[in-house]
Image (spheres, helix red, strand yellow):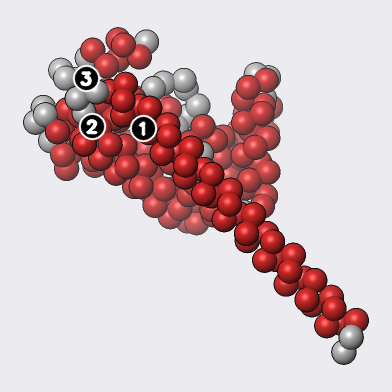
Amino acid sequence: MTEEILSHLVEWGLPILGCVIFLSCLALPLPSSIVMLTCGSLVGAGDMPLVVTWLTALVSAVLGDQFGYSLGHRFGVTLIHRLENSPKRHALIDRARHALESSGPNTVFLSRWLFSPLGPYVNFLCGAAHYTWAKFTVWSILGETLWVTLYLGLGYGFGENIALISEIASDVTGIFAAIAVVFALLWYARILIHRHAEAQHANHP
């Protein structure tokens, strides 16, 4: 499927880009990152316009997030239950649920670009849990803006070798994920130290 989609990008670039990104936000298994990288390389080659391509990708991603949120809001538990019939999706939904419970806004933002496999399920869960729409939208737009800019930029800069930039994108995501884990651990350690200090102060007024 990936090769077939990529083969039509030069002729039908923007419609394919928009459809793939929109549908990937609804948990359909489409190669949105590869398509984005390829479009970046086409922009670099002069076959696609930069601003229009960037806007198409961003608007499609935000609309996909909004539609996913709406599906979750309307169908709620029924939709989540049906998705959980797949073991792989069940694991992703569990990860998304725990992340939302611990840090809602950060999870919405990071699942747009850093932990993108969680993105569609975060959309559904936010809608099902009646998570504040305005807050969801703000963090969704911020995250999607970063994702679109990052992947189009990688494609633009390393467009002569799609396989190479795919590997680079994977490495970059892994590096960012590792950094995010380190900061999360430091933040948690700081909270524990603060609580310990408060407990000592309370025991020794």
Camera-nearest residue between 60 and 184: 184
- Residue 99, position as x, y percentages in the image: 63, 45
Q: Secondary structure at mark 2?
A: loop
Q: How many marks?
A: 3
Classed neighbour count for the residue bearing mark 1: other residues with Cα under 10 Å, few (<14), some (14–19), many (≥20): some
Is the residue 197 above or below the residue 52 in the image?
below
Q: Nearer the viewer, mark 3 or mark 2?
A: 2
**Residue occupying the point 63% across, 22% down:** 88
Is the residue 12 above or below the residue 1 in the image?
below
Using the numbered discs, state the Cα–Cα distance from disc 3 to disc 2 in whole angstroms: 17 Å
- Residue 89, position as x, y percentages in the image: 62, 25
Q: Are marks 3 and 2 in contact (CB under 8 Å)?
A: no
Q: Using residue 80 as the reference point, say whether residue 71 is left or right of it.
A: left
- Residue 149, position as x, y percentages in the image: 29, 44
Task: Identify the residue position indicated by label 2 in the image.
Answer: 158
Classed neighbour count for the residue bearing mark 3: other residues with Cα under 10 Å, few (<14), some (14–19), many (≥20): some
- Residue 69, position as x, y percentages in the image: 51, 40
Q: Using residue 192 as the reference point, say whether residue 37 is left or right of it.
A: left
Using the numbered discs, state the Cα–Cα distance from disc 2 to disc 1 in whole angstroms: 9 Å
- The type of residue carrying mark 2 is Phe
Q: Secondary structure at mark 1?
A: helix
Q: Secondary structure at mark 3?
A: loop
Quarter of the image where the N terminus is located: top left
Task: Identify the residue position indicated by label 1 in the image.
Answer: 168
Q: Are marks 2 and 1 in contact (CB under 8 Å)?
A: yes
Earlier-in-chain disc, 2 versus 1: 2
Using the numbered discs, state the Cα–Cα distance from disc 3 to disc 1 in whole angstroms: 21 Å
Is the residue 105 above or below the residue 24 in the image?
below
Residue 35 showing in the rendered view = no
Residue 6 showing in the rendered view = yes
Task: Identify the residue position indicated by label 3 in the image.
Answer: 9
